[in-house]
Image: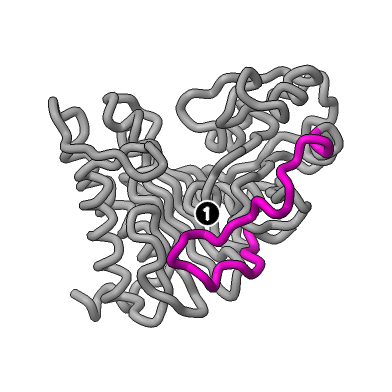
Amino acid sequence: MAEVMAELSDLELAHHMADVATRISLRHFNRSEIPTADKDDGSPVSVADLEVDRALVHILRRARPADGILTEESGACASGRRRWILDPIDGTAPFLAGEDGWGTHIALEADGCLQLAVLTRPVDGRRWWAVRGGGAYASTDADPMSTTRRLAVTAVVDLASSRIGGFVSPAESEAAAAVARQAHWVVEESSPVVALLEGRLDAVLDEGGNAWDMAPGALLVAEAGGLFTDPSGGTRLDMHWGLYGGRAIHAALSTVLARHLPVKESARPLSGADEESEGDHSAAAT
């Protein structure tokens, strides 16, 4: 089996991992009781998160033994010039609540530059994927590598008529409140980044996200014709802040957000175990 997986392309391997994660997570989904604990930051982690995490790390150690691995649940458990960034179950809270706004995040970077991304929504049997320089696509679990539906972010220019979403509400964030005063703030419960990719939103503000949260969306949006930037205007994934959007509206929002950016000193390594992550972690071509 290891030999077979080693022969898969990186994209084929990523989709294989997505398949495995979907099977495991759906086996636990909607169970009456799922053993759960609270992490140090207060967020929940379930046995399903941990089982998916172990399975994906196991696959990578067999198929790509020279590659680095960073996951939400295991931290940095291997190092290398190439690194896989994984969130076994992004959206554990909705997963535990029996809702559909959860899935697996898979990204691969090489020399700090994202190369591919896969984002899934198992309840709906859908996924979104991208390859650097090859575009971004929406597909299904039944035909994961389909290129029939190519994604493109909107080309909205006017801030006043734009639809902006995020992960922190304007009531809880000065930055989001500043945006909401000049644009239409839209609550997108399932996935703001997916809503951006599918044209329901024009931009997304992410305050507090980690590398495993942002990596797939950063490449997907870039390959769909948009931009992802960190507070400094670069593409680092370790600054716990990101702005995704079409190019014109991204520029307008950057002006609005200029007074509400987190201080540069707030940038932290991707995980406590990942000391090498203080370098530039590029998200996508701009």
What residue is rendered at 24% in x and 60% in y? 54
Is residue 278 shown in magenta? yes
Task: Using the rendered view, name the quadrant where residue 280 is placed.
Answer: bottom right
What residue is rendered at 29% in x and 42% in y? 45
Q: Is residue 30 above or below residue 47?
A: above
The residue under label 1 is: 211
Q: The N terminus lies in which quarter of the figure? A: bottom left
Q: Is residue 12 above or below residue 45?
A: below
Image x and y of residue 28, in percent:
17, 38
SS for tag 1?
helix
Image x and y of residue 245, in percent:
70, 39
Q: In the drawing, does residue 264 fall left or right of residue 16?
A: right
Q: Nearer the viewer, residue 245 or 181?
A: 181
Q: Nearer the viewer, residue 149 or 220?
A: 220
- Would residue 249 be visible to someone looking at this image? no
Q: Residues within 10 Å of mark 1 (few under 14, many from 20)?
A: many
Task: Using the rendered view, name the quadrant where residue 122 is placed.
Answer: top left
- Would residue 204 be visible to someone looking at this image? yes
Q: Nearer the viewer, residue 100 or 268?
A: 268
Image x and y of residue 188, in percent:
54, 23
What residue is rendered at 81% in x and 20% in y? 182
What residue is rendered at 86% in x and 37% in y? 255
Task: Using the rendered view, name the quadrant where residue 90 is placed.
Answer: top left
Q: The C terminus lies in which quarter of the figure? A: bottom right
Q: Is residue 117 above or below residue 150?
A: below
Image x and y of residue 117, in percent:
50, 56
Q: In the drawing, does residue 143 fall left or right of residue 134?
A: left
Colour option used: one colour
Is residue 150 shown in magenta? no
Q: Nearer the viewer, residue 157 or 160?
A: 160
Residue interval drawn in magenta: 257-283
Tag 1: residue type?
A: Ala
